Structures are given as C-alpha cells and as structure tokens.
Amino acid sequence: DTGVSQDPRHKITKRGQNVTFRCDPISEHNRLYWYRQTLGQGPEFLTYFQNEAQLEKSRLLSDRFSAERPKGSFSTLEIQRTEQGDSAMYLCASSFGLGAEHGYTFGSGTRLTVV
Amino acid sequence: DQQVKQNSPSLSVQEGRISILNCDYTNSMFDYFLWYKKYPAEGPTFLISISSIKDKNEDGRFTVFLNKSAKHLSLHIVPSQPGDSAVYFCAARRSPGNQFYFGTGTSLTVIP
C-alpha cells in the first residue's frame, strides 16, 4: 500500500474557474477526511466520510464546495467559481476507525493557487 | 476562534537535550489530543495521542502530558535528534463528532 494519494499535487487556476481534486485513501480505511491549510495556520476541518456517507461538514464548506465519495473508495473535492481566498493546501486523510487513538494518515496534499 | 493554540512558533534545541512543545486549548469538550509532525512538502504524520481521561502517554522518545485543569498539554522529546527537526502540530477532537481542531504549529530545530 502506498499510503494516501492525492492528485494533482499542484493546481493553478484563474478566478472563477472550477477545480476538482482526487484522493485515494488507504484501501482498508473506511473513514476519509478533507482538511484545508493556509500559510501559517494548522489544518482546518472541511468534511468527513464514513464509507460513502458524508457525516460531518464544516461551516467553512460553502455552497461552492462539494465532496463525494462514491462507493466508499476514492473521494473528490470540487470547488466551483474559485476565489483568491480558496488558495491553500488541501489535505486528504484516512483512518480505520475514528482516528482518535491512532490518528489519521494524511496525503501530501494538493496546493491550489487561484490567480 | 482558535480553540487550540501553540504560542511558540519556533524552538531550537541542542541534539541530545529535551525538546518541550506546548499547546493550550479552550474547549472542555475535547476528548482526545494528538500530536502530528510535518516535514516540508509532506502531509502531517501522526506521532502520539492521549485521551482526556489520562494525564500521560509514552511512546519511545515521545511523551505527552495532559493537564486538564490548566487546559494544557505538552510533548516531550528525549533525547532530541536532528531528524526530529520539523513542524509539530497539536490537535484536539471535540466530542461528539470526529472533527479535529489543529494549532498553528511549532517549528522545532534540533542543532547537531
């Protein structure tokens, strides 16, 4: 197993365009998380899935953001009508169980730059 | 509002000495606390956790202490090694739910 994979690693887009990121979790992990990290800050929770069900969403996840995890495997995070404030590192993580005692396994992230 | 705070942006320690990283929190509903380490261009890596019902947890060179009355936790690394140089994040989970709140990180440099 190669860990949590995120694609692409970097994305530069013009303001107003839509972007989609993909995350492939560790295969036996049933929980998948999306976090966002801006410069000088820690990761901020966006949303989390247990299998294919989206169980929690942060108020940071505005109407322009949507996440899916079809069939409980890979996940996609789409941002519509991107704004400069969306520029950040988007981190995906997965865990078997709640991730409280043993933490999550994070991917290396997708860095989004909106110009 | 920042519910998990790491007030020291950076820390330098000599190799072989103890590194102590601190974290404060405001929400008494947090039930689990974790420490992650992050190298540049990589995602955070889980280090160690502690439940709110405990006051200490050890794993090799890493020990986490929790003081609930002070809403404070700390990570001790003994002895510190140059490979420990990284950014360390403290994170806390609020019960119920599975959302973790992260601090802003402390950059540790271990000087050979």
Image (spheres, coloured by chain):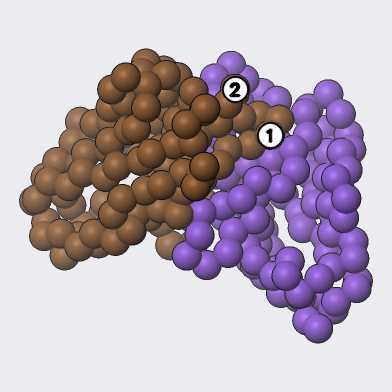
Chain colours: A brown, B purple
Q: Position of residue B48 (x, y in %)?
A: 75, 43
Q: Is residue B76 above or below residue A47?
A: below
Residue B15 in the figure: left or right of residue B98: right
Across and down, in percent, residue A91 comes to: 42, 47
- Callout 1: 10 Å neighbours few (<14), some, many (20+)? some
Residue B62 against residue A29 in the figure, above or below: below
Identity of the residue drawn at 52% across and 67% down: B40
Q: Say which quarter of the image contains residue A39.
A: bottom left
Nearer the observer, A45 or A2: A2
Residue A107 visible to an observer of this rendering: yes
Q: Earlier in the sequence, mark 2 or mark 1?
A: 2
Residue B85 placement, left or right of A66: right
Mark identifier at residue A65 = none
The quadrant holding residue B31 is top right
**Identity of the residue drawn at 42% across and 19% down:** A51
- Which of the pair B100/A103 is nearer the observer? A103
Query: What chain letter is assigned to the residue under label 2?
Result: A
Residue depicted at 28% across the width and 36% down the height = A76
Q: Amino acid at mark 1?
A: His
Question: Quick one: B65 or A91, which is closer to the camera?
Answer: A91
What residue is shown with label 2? A97
Horizontal and vertical percent for residue A28? 52, 27
Pointer 2 and pointer 1: residues touching (CB < 8 Å)?
yes
Question: Circle 1 is placed at which residue position?
Answer: A102
Q: How many marks?
A: 2
- Which x, y percent locates residue A45? 45, 37
Label 2 amino acid? Gly
Q: Is residue A37 visible?
A: no
Numbered disc 1: secondary structure: loop
